[in-house]
Image: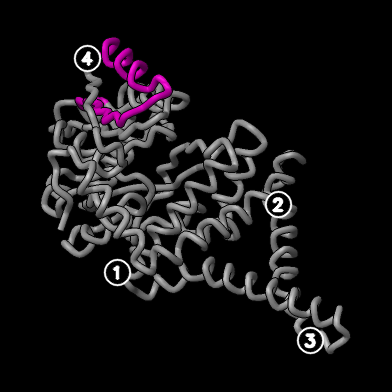
């Protein structure tokens, strides 16, 4: 471990517990764990990895990492979901600062030091920063460009940056344990968007959520179109569920993708009706419906060639596919989520498969 540039002694610094849920992440988990061991924070720490039922060699890899360093502890997460794994890891650890880590993330060496200093300076219950998506292939580069743009994910500060200050939510998060325990930790019934929901409870409890652009975490995007589609359909479904359960003025922006999906669908149907009218020789006013999907296609094409000048030609071509994939899968998922289906499915799975010793938050 390096020494802190702040000059504080390790005895004066709070201990840190890194908590990481892992499921079929053999490709990325080694780099994620290495980034924790290479932090320049001089205080004591441990690493708790909650492993779900994996079939790609993840279990064997984390066991190997644990044998190589006694500070790494491997825990079983029989449910396999992210919130249950986080709760298991948090409960098994003990230090007063809890750092959430994603298996797809790589923390910069100064991450923990800056986060702890920010907590001590602001008194916030949770501190976080920017999800700095970076790809290793042209497809992943395209996904990363979409993540970091307003056209892709809407331009929230934890994706595109912004000024330091209070926020609704942040990427990952560095928490005060006493605040986590007081608000009930992660709700295991919420499979995606659990960060936002937890931060809502933290804010309601009187403890702030603090965003600082000094914290940037490298994130590795999904490596294939099918995995990206599944990710965003699930994300959209749970965002629909959370928007219905916890409406607020900020909720309105989440309706943009489903409204776009419905508008494009209606436009296509009207256009097809217009083609039928044209074929039978009647006035084909409905052909104007094609203007809606044509306008959307134009926006995607302009965005694909305007985003980030450092993209390769192949990555820019992939953007023509990635942007609609994100928009449509998210928007289509939002609709059943908003209509109660997400919570019903989750409740059934939770009743059947929950082997966690931690109960969901109220």
Mark 1 element type: loop
**Label 1 close to label 3 by CB (< 8 Å):** no
Mark 1 or 3, nearer chain start: 1
Q: CA distance from mark 1 to mark 2?
A: 33 Å
Q: Secondary structure at mark 3?
A: helix
Crowding near the residue tagged with mark 2, few <14, some 14–19, many ≥20 C-alpha atoms within 10 Å: some
Give the CA separation, mark 1 to mark 3.
Answer: 41 Å
Render colour scheme? one colour
Tell me the distance, in whole angstroms, between the alpha carbons under discs 2 and 3.
29 Å
Please tell me whether mark 2 sits on a helix, a strand or a loop.
Answer: helix
Residues at discs 4 and 2 in contact (Cβ within 8 Å):
no
- Give the magenta range: 42-69
Pick the quarter of the image with the C terminus.
bottom left
Vertically, is 337 above or below 60?
below
In the rendered image, residue 270, in percent from the top left (x then y), is placed at 70, 78
Q: Nearer the viewer, residue 336 or 58?
A: 336
In the picture of the structure, the residue carrying the numbered disc 4 is 70
Picture coordinates of residue 295 (x, y %)?
73, 70
Q: Which mark is residue 246?
A: 1
Q: Do the CB atoms of the residues marked 4 and 1 lie less than 8 Å apart?
A: no
Residue nearest the observer in this picture, 278 or 245 = 278
């Amino acid at each position: 471990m390096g020494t802190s540039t702040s000059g504080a002694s390790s005895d004066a610094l709070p201990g840190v517990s890194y908590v990481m849920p892992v499921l079929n992440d053999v490709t990325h988990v080694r780099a994620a764990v290495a980034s924790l061991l290479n932090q320049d924070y001089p205080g004591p720490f441990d690493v708790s990895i909650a492993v779900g039922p994996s079939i790609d060699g993840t279990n064997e890899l984390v066991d190997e990492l644990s044998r190589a360093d006694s500070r790494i502890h491997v825990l079983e997460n029989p449910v396999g979901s992210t919130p249950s794994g986080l709760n298991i890891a948090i409960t098994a650890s003990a230090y007063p600062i809890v750092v959430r880590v994603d298996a797809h993330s790589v923390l910069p060496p100064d991450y923990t030091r800056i986060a702890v200093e920010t907590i001590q300076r602001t008194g916030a219950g949770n501190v976080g920063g920017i999800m700095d998506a970076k790809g290793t292939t042209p497809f992943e580069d395209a996904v990363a460009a979409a993540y970091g743009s307003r056209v892709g994910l809407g331009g929230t500060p934890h994706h595109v940056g912004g000024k330091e200050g209070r926020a609704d939510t942040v990427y990952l998060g560095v928490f005060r344990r006493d605040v986590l325990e007081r608000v009930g930790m992660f709700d295991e019934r919420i499979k995606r968007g659990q960060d936002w929901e937890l931060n809502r409870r933290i804010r309601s409890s009187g403890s702030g959520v603090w965003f600082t652009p000094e914290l940037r975490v490298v994130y590795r995007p999904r490596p294939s179109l099918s995995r990206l589609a599944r990710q965003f359909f699930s994300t959209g479904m749970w965002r629909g569920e959370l928007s219905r359960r916890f409406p607020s003025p900020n909720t309105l922006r989440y309706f943009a993708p489903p409204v776009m999906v419905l508008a494009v669908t209606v436009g296509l149907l009207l256009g097809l009706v217009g083609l039928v009218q044209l074929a039978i020789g009647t006035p084909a006013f409905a052909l104007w419906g094609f203007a809606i999907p044509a306008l959307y296609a134009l926006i995607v094409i302009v965005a694909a060639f305007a985003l980030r000048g450092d993209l390769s030609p192949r990555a820019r071509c992939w953007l023509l596919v990635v942007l609609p994939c994100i928009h449509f899968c998210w928007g289509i998922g939002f609709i059943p989520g908003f209509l109660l289906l997400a919570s019903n499915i989750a409740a059934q799975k939770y009743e059947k498969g929950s082997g966690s010793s931690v109960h969901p938050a109220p």
